[in-house]
Amino acid sequence: MRRKDREIADFEGIVKIIDGCDILRIGLSDGDTPYIVPVNFGYTADGGQICFFVHGAAAGRKYELMKRNGVCSFEADIPLKMETTKGRSVTMRYKSVMGRAKIVFLEGEEKERAMSEVIMARYELTKNFDYDRSALEHTAVAMLKVTEITAKANL
């Protein structure tokens, strides 16, 4: 990281940024071309380990690339505001996290628990929503086990 003065290194600070993000962008390798997908997510942060949980159709480009490669990059951010500064420059105030993760697809009870207790529970609108669990049959739920993470803020 070039700007060490903007680095957020403590685990609690990193988790606080993640908690304020609505969308996680995952970067997947598609041959010579990166493929970036914005997704809703849930997460856990236990014992210094962060895991993101995402879901989607158990078919299609995103699913196939996740299955084929088994790893991804990720990024999430909180844009705060654009600001002019002394000396006639412009800067963006923000908080962000980025890194790499290993992709593990969940099945059975783990899959249902991740969907209900992590992903759905994260959002106010869906945390008590009685969704159609039969849809899980055609839904892929993946855990992105973070292997590297950095966080940065320009406040």
Image: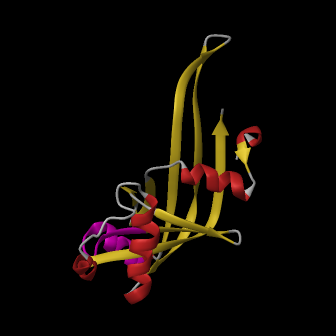
Q: Is residue 124 above or below residue 62?
A: above
The spot of residue 98 in percent (x, y) is 57, 54
The front one of 111 and 126 is: 126
Left or right, 120 with respect to 75, comes to left
Left or right, 6 with respect to 17, comes to right
Q: Is residue 34 above or below residue 134?
A: above
Residue 56 falls within the magenta-colored stretch? yes
Read off the magenta span: 54-68
**Image mark count:** 0
Query: At x 66% / y 54%, what residue is drawn?
Result: 14
Left or right, 50 with respect to 28, comes to right
The spot of residue 144 in percent (x, y) is 50, 71
Query: At x 44% / y 75%, what residue is drawn?
Result: 114
Seen as rendered, the residue at the extreme top is 87
The spot of residue 100 in percent (x, y) is 57, 64
- The colouring scheme, among rainbow, by chain, secondary structure or one colour, is secondary structure
Query: At x 23% / y 74%, what residue is drawn?
Result: 132
Is residue 2 visible in the rendered structure shown here? Answer: no
- Residue 154 image-quadrant placement: top right
Residue 45 falls within the magenta-colored stretch? no
Is residue 151 visible in the rendered structure shown here? Answer: yes
Q: Is residue 56 above or below residue 23?
A: below
The spot of residue 116 in percent (x, y) is 40, 73
Left or right, 103 with respect to 146, comes to left
The front one of 136 and 70 is: 136
